[in-house]
Amino acid sequence: MKKLAISAFCPCYNDAGSIASMVVLMDKVVRSITDDYELLVIDDGSTDTSRLILRELEAKYPKLRLIFHEKNKGYGGALQAGFYAAKKEFIFYTDGDFQYDITELPKLAALMRDGVDVVNGYKICRSDPMNRIVIGFLYQHFMKALFQFKIRDVDCDFRLMRRKVFDNLNLKYKSGVVCVEMIRKMQDRGVVFDEVPVSHYHRVYGRSQFFNFRRVFQVGRDLLILWWDLVVMRRG
């Protein structure tokens, strides 16, 4: 396997309790794969001490680049900032809350080869409260049926991708719907996927921003609009 040039990033929103550990560990893991890399953290309008911590980290880690949103743009907005700011040939991203094990990145890198554009993780077993496990199970199967996904886990935010797949990929959703939009648009463009099982753990800090009525309503509405545009009307 040739060495990969990697832009590795994670979004951050009020993750003061975990973001320093994430940056330190991400630097160590990516450096074990390649010396041609950069780290990005997209702070999406944090109101805790995340930014102070990130500024201190920036002084210690020369490979670290920070992007600050003055206002919260949503999970999709943070991901889009990372995708389009990345400079290396490959992009890796995951969340900053340690629900995925960053040390499993080499498993993705080992499958990135000629002819593969995206290596997508899928959760071996979801480690969440029972209500979220049930909702996640139903969501996965509903999304797979609705959008005809060929991959197992559209909701697994542990991915290694070629940067070129974003060259003509216009993402517009700022919520968590962006992952459904991204994978479906990639699939429609003939992007080649491979998959690998990855671990999933309980959140170590903070709480999910998704589970409130307003966000659930917004996501449901956005998914219906997205389904109409991409599946029914085929407006990609």
Image (spheres, rainbow, N blue to C red):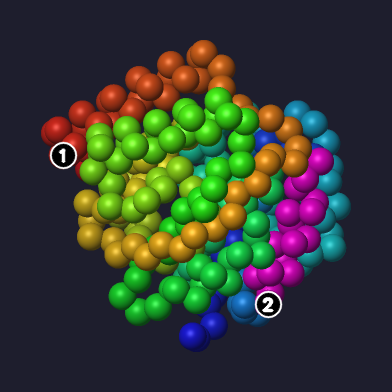
* Residue placed under numbered mark 1 in the picture: 234
Relative horizontal placement of residue 65, taking residue 147 as reference (left or right): right
Amino acid identity at mark 2: Ser
* Residue placed under numbered mark 2 in the picture: 32
Q: How many marks?
A: 2
Relative horizontal placement of residue 56, taking residue 230 as reference (left or right): right
Residue contact between numbered discs 2 and 1, judged by CB atoms under 8 Å: no
Query: Considering depth in this image, is 234 or 1 the residue closer to the camera?
Result: 1
Q: Magenta stretch mostly in which secondary structure?
A: helix
Please give the range of residues in magenta: 17-32
Tag 2's secondary structure? Answer: helix
Amino acid identity at mark 1: Arg
Query: Considering depth in this image, is 16 or 86 the residue closer to the camera?
Result: 16
Extreme residue in the bottom direction = 2
Relative horizontal placement of residue 62, taking residue 4 as reference (left or right): right
Q: Where is the C terminus found, in terms of image quarters?
A: top left
Q: Is residue 7 magenta?
A: no
Give the image location of residue 18, x and y in percent. Answer: 77, 45
Residue 9's place in the image compared with 113, above or below, is above
Give the image location of residue 171, x and y in percent. Answer: 37, 42
Relative horizontal placement of residue 183, taking residue 119 as reference (left or right): left
Graded by Cα atoms within 10 Å as few (under 14), some (14 to 19) or many (20 or more), the crowding at tag 1 reads few
Residue drawn at x 61%, y 42% is: 127
- Could you say which quadrant of the image residue 203 lies in? top right
| Mark 2 vs mark 1: in front | 2
Tag 1's secondary structure? Answer: loop
Residue 39's place in the image compared with 70, above or below, is below
Extreme residue in the left direction = 233
Residue drawn at x 47%, y 20% is: 216
Residue 183 seen in render: yes
Give the image location of residue 78, x and y in percent. Answer: 55, 41
